[in-house]
Image (tube, coloured by chain):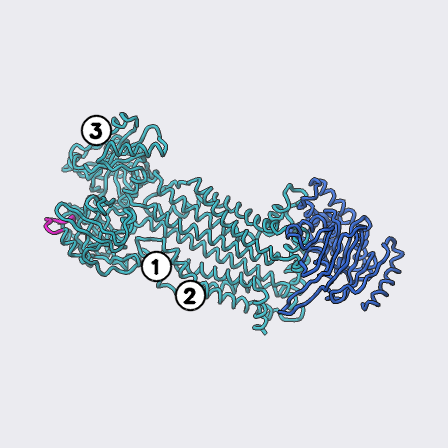
Amino acid sequence: MSNILEVKDLCKTYIINKRQNNVLKNVSFSISEGEMVAIMGPSGSGKSTLLYNVSGMDSFTAGSVRFCGNELSGFTESELSDLRLDKMGFIFQQMYMLKNLTIFDNILLPSLQSKSNTKSRKEKVEYAQSLMRRLGIIDIADNDINEVSGGQLQRACICRSMINSPKMIFADEPTGALNRTTSDEVMDELAKLNADGTTIMLVTHDVKVAAKCSRVMFLVDGNISGEYNLEKWNADSQLRDRERTLSNWLMEMGW
Amino acid sequence: MYINILKKDLKRKKTMNVILLLFVILASMFVSSSTNNIISVATAFDDYFEMAGVPDFFAEISDNSSIDDIINDVDAVSSYKTEPLLYFADGSKFTHNGEELDINMPTLTSFSDRCINFYDSDNNEISVVEKGETYLPKYVMDNNKLSLGDTITIDTDDKKLDLKIKGYSKDAFLGSSAISMSRFILNDNDFNYITKDRTNLSGSFYYINTDDTSELSNKLSDCDLPILFMGDRDTIKLTYFMDEVIAAYILIVSVGLILIAFAVLRFSINFTLEEEYREIGVMKAIGIKNGKIRGLYLVKFFVISCVGAFIGFFFGIPFGKMLLSSASQNMIIGNDSRYYINVLCSFLVVIVVMLFCFWCTRKIKKFTPIDAVRSGTTGERFKKKSKLSLAKSHFKPIPFIALNDILSNLKRYVVMALVFIFGITVMMILSNTGNTITDSSILNYMGVLSGDAYMSFDDYPDYYTDANEKLYKRCMDVENKLDEHNMSATCYTEIVYKLRVRHNGNSYLSQTYVGINTDTSDYEYIEGTAPQNKNEIALTPLVCEKIGADIGDTVTITDGENQLSFVVTAKFQTLTNLGEGVRLYNDVKLNNIIPNGYSGILIRFNDNPSAGVLSSRIDTLKELYPKATVYDSFGYMKSMIGDIAEPINNLKYLIAPICLMICMLVIVLMERSFISKEKGEIAMLKSIGFRNSSIVLIHTLRIAYIMIVSIIIGAAISLPITNLAAGPCFKMMGMQNVNFIVNIPEVFILYPAAMFICTITAAVLTALCTRKISTSEIANIE
């Protein structure tokens, strides 16, 4: 499998009150197409910053990020926008959506905005409906965002991230605001997407969530201090073993 | 604690606090300057007349006649003064650099003989006029492109006098361009030099102070002395009708600005407090009492409103002066002595801000901490937000989001729409009034038939006898000559008499018109039917009022020893001679009365020529009749009532940029508020791949939609509002029914386009701030 994301010597520095704060320090890693990678680490270790920097949401101080072979630092603001629209999908911990639009319109919006998505308007609408049906939220299509539960909203966010069939989805603690049952349901959906070939990189604190990924990277003080490879998860029966091994490794890493 | 929290709040929420401060400054500025202007304008005439010492009653007597005996016979007269004057029929004796000046009846007054006070351009009383210097009306300077320091020469038959223009004078009595006399104020030596060796002067003005103007008026009307003109203060006031129109506009603009100020204030306070709901929830959650939380916001708003009102007070003074500057160049309208009003208004703004704040924060008591965290909604009942469906519509995402945002938060955009509608309507009202007042159809309101060209001749003594026949022949001659030059036209004229009309013991000396080669039914009447017989007559409402006559009454006119009786069949309106006028049936002959003059030859071409053809025909007329002064309809109107287009244009050029500026300012502040509130959503749109340009477009389109709707509403209501606003001003002048002329390209294209371009530019420039919002600010979303 070829690498979809290659990160080399990535540094991110914030200057706060004239004090330099190095959040990411020479981070290097790569993610192959079809992988599902979890970033774990203690609070303040730079997990979300890493996610935002490698996805072109934020600019980095030094280093190199190559997405699908293209160096992100060479992209203009507009090219980065197009990249996020067509080739990347985003899921956040809070279910950010436009409050003046219905759930369905929020999901449909990126596809209508995309120039690369050559489907007709009707096909885009049908595809959005099929995504919602697949994630079991077709009933709330015409609801406002304040009329549905957090789990439903997060699934809607997953639909939105999928609407332009991106090459890779970035998720920042996608289950952070959800209860266990809902969290499991959302992760199941992400795993299904991954099984269908979508690369996923997610940030999480939850071992149960990370256990469903094929690889876990552990970030401490802006450095990747270790990686743990898991086999691709394909059966619930394996889950408990995966969680246990992962927990053991995390404890070794100082979790 | 309050001070610490306040300090942190002011620092942390800089944008919203600065926006609120700017709105308070704006409100304070508008309210204080506008209120002061309203009071100034409402009392302007009385104040100005009082300052200038305008009398209760005046009369103009020709030659060396005297009305002293009559005045002394009226007990109510407390005092009177006389002012000798010398006037000339036209400006032909006045030149500048050898060129004849275009001056309507230049009139000379000696400064030491003055009976009223004159003021200069800076509103200072003129205390001295040096030898060789003169002050003259502003419109004379403008019409002849004269500047301060220019020298004009008066060249009478035997004397020549050079006068340097020291400045223009504000003359409360003869200062309006609607008065046919143009007064030059001279040094005593210069005046004596010009009048020396003359057996008599042109006449004199009587300035009379009396408690009973009607008794004096009746007595003067009944005498047989050559009284050319007389009236009371209200009559003088009427000469300032253009200034009244302009003052009325300033009132409208001022009231509008006050309404805008309060609407904008309410918007910004509500908007700012909505920003604070989450913090209110947190404070409630940690146990701070409602009163203390409310107090915290009241203190903060109090500080902001005090600072804003203070700054607004200072900005309000020059802003108010700027608005008033266009009010009149002929009179004094000042707001200098009323700074206490500005102070009171700024204080009022603080009170209003505090009341709004008190009202808006009352919800704090009702909210549970969680309700407040949820931005003021109880969570039990959410309002449906989305109004349109992207999936079902055919809109592209960007125009859709913009439209849906407006429909989902309609209240938020109402203030913006009101400001736009106000701006566009004010500009359209001014345009409609300006176009109406400069359109040839205004001649109908002057009791003159509208025509294509007008020729005035300086030969009226030729018509002292047999005027009807001679003038009819003159009209025919002109018609024949025009025919020979392939300019087939109908020509007509009016003989003008100064006649005393009597009814029930009352009498009034009025201009009286007899049409030649025309029909009384061709003229417009506001009431009744046109005179159909030689014993029928039409009067203006002013004459009716003076002699107590109405339609159906019989009035009399003396023609030598004959007492002629006429039945009043109609009323007509006229702007000339302050609304006085009598119209007899066409071709009526008054054998024993010498006409005062005739109206010149009015020409109406039979082929309805275009503007270009008309212009070349006017040139041909000038060649055919070198001794005549040839006018187009606008020029003729200008010669009759002065240049009324200029003041209205001046006002237009001042008010239009102010309206545009206000709209732009409101857009910048409101758009800035929206951006501040929508930071999270903007970041989210960016995170899912919307370009900066797309977000700028969404924000700009929202303003554009509101602008388009406002323009449509403004255009739809502009004519009724013009009628409502300007109609009463014209009514005061005796123009009962005015059909306002709408200049379609100006009103429906130029102004909307200017407004659209300015507001959209402001919107784009402000929306460019969204570029600075990074995707990482997504956490600001509510």
Q: Where is residue B670 in the image (x, y as percent from the top left)?
A: 54, 56
Residue A126 visible from this viewpoint: yes
Q: In this view, does B53 lie to the left or right of B700?
A: left
Point out the tag, 1 or 3, that comes first from the N-terminus: 1
Chain letter of disc 1 in the image: B
- Within 10 Å of the Cα at label 2, are there few (<14), some (14-19), or many (20+) other Cα atoms? some
Residue B427 highlighted magenta (yes or no): no
Asked if labels 1 and 3 share a chain, the reply is: yes
Residue at numbered disc 2? B343
Give the side of residue B309 with respect to residue B728, left or right. Answer: right
- The residue carrying mark 1 is B334
Task: Decide: few, some or many residues near mark 3? Use Cα within 10 Å; few <14, some 14-19, many ≥20.
Answer: some
Q: What residue type is labelled 1?
A: Gly
Most foreground residue, B682 or B307: B682
Q: Earlier in the sequence, mark 1 or mark 2?
A: 1
Judge by depth and name the residue closer to the eye, B640 or B678. B678
- The chain letter corresponding to blue is A
Image check: B199 left or right of B34? left
Host chain of mark 3: B
Q: What stretch is highlighted in magenta?
A: B195-203
At label 2, the amino acid type is: Val
Residue type, mark 3 in image: Lys
Question: What color does chain B have in the rendering?
Answer: cyan
- Would you place residue A144 above or below residue B599 in this image? below
Horizontal and vertical percent position of residue B266 = 53, 59
Q: In which quarter of the image is the N terminus of chain B?
A: bottom right
Chain containing mark 2? B
Residue under numbered circle 3 = B473
Secondary structure state at the residue bearing disc 2:
helix
Q: Nearer the viewer, residue B54 or B335?
A: B335
